[in-house]
Image (spheres, rainbow, N blue to C red):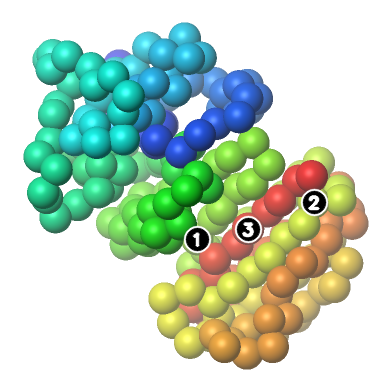
């Protein structure tokens, strides 16, 4: 595995307002791949990427093509972020943290990156979309344990299917094998962590889980 690191960090082109995310997820622990203008974020926070990929249509100053910089055509079948994940898998990684991949002016890219999470999951990996205040997980037949998150807002939605069956503990509104339905009453939105350890368990289906800390 590249550089004997266990996880891969993808830095996307969406704006990152501060470097706090890189305090929580130290790039030195990761094999870092910058997607498109994500390399400008890396420069801003003095991060040395292991690889740079993209067509650089969103970059103010495209990097020079080098051994670790792969310039892609603008017309292609995958996004720059998806290509970065494919390269991460090719390097042997199964665990991915995606930063700079939410928000910004391109809502369609945020949605596309949810599909990237789905791709990672479908291919046996684990992925997380991480921003300074927001973490996004896709959970399928598994549990997510949250610690030291009292006051955080948790929202859960069915994803890639009509329903998901879930249980919560440590939240203001607990559930016990309840079914969330796509197009239903949105009973999974805006819950709140009330205990030092909380848990979301997905018994069936896939749950898109968003954790927001103000």
Instruction: Tell whether 147 sits left or right of 25.
Output: right
Left or right of residue 14, residue 64 in this image: left
Place residue 115 in its image quadrant.
bottom left
Circle 1 residues within 10 Å: few <14, some 14–19, many ≥20? many
Question: In whole angstroms, how far apart are the C-alphas of marks 1 and 2?
Answer: 18 Å
Q: Which residue is at the front of the view, 164 or 108?
A: 108
Q: Using the image, determine if residue 64 lies above or below residue 181.
A: above
What x and y, as percent, mark residue 164?
Answer: 55, 80
Which label lies toward us, 1 or 2?
A: 2
Q: Which residue is mark 2?
A: 152
Q: Alpha carbon of mark 3 to alpha carbon of mark 1: how far?
A: 9 Å
Expressed as whole percent of the image width and height from the top left, the position of residue 101 reads 45, 43
Q: Is residue 194 visible?
A: yes
Looking at the rendered structure, the secondary structure element under dot 1 is: strand
Asked whether the residues under the numbered discs 2 and 3 touch, taking CB atoms below 8 Å apart as contact, a structural biologist would say: no
Q: Is residue 60 left or right of residue 87?
A: right
User: N-terminal of the two: label 3 or label 1?
Assistant: 1
* Residue at x 54% of width, y 77% of height: 158
Q: Residue at x 31, y 35 (%)?
A: 58
Say which mark, if any, is on residue 138: 1
Q: Is residue 186 above or below residue 61?
A: below
Q: Residue 201: horizontal and vertical position, in percent? A: 64, 67
Q: Quadrant of residue 190?
A: bottom right
Residue 210, labelled with which disc?
A: 3
Which quadrant does the N terminus fall into?
Answer: top left
The answer to whether residue 128 is visible is no
- The image shows residue 55 at horizontal and vertical percentages of 19, 35
Q: Say above or below: 199 vs 97.
A: below
Mark positioned earlier in the residue sequence (2 or 3): 2
Dot 3: element:
strand
């Amino acid at each position: 595995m590249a550089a004997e690191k266990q996880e891969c960090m993808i830095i996307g082109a969406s704006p990152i307002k501060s470097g706090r995310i890189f305090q929580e997820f130290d790039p030195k622990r990761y094999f870092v791949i910058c997607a498109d203008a994500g390399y400008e974020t890396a420069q801003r926070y003095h991060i040395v990427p292991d690889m740079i990929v993209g067509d650089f249509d969103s970059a103010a100053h495209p990097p020079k093509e080098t051994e670790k910089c792969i310039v892609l055509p603008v017309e292609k079948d995958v996004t720059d972020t998806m290509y970065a994940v494919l390269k991460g898998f090719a390097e042997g990684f199964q665990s991915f943290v995606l930063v700079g991949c939410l928000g910004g002016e391109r809502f369609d890219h945020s949605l596309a990156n949810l599909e990237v999470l789905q791709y990672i999951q479908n291919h046996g990996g684990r992925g997380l979309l991480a921003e300074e205040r927001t973490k996004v997980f896709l959970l399928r037949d598994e549990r997510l344990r949250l610690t030291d998150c009292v006051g955080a807002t948790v929202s859960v939605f069915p994803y890639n299917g009509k329903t998901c069956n879930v249980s919560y503990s440590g939240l203001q509104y607990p559930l016990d094998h309840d079914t969330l339905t796509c197009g239903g009453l949105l009973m999974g939105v805006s819950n709140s962590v009330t205990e030092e350890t909380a848990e979301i368990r997905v018994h069936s289906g896939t749950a898109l889980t968003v954790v927001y800390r103000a």
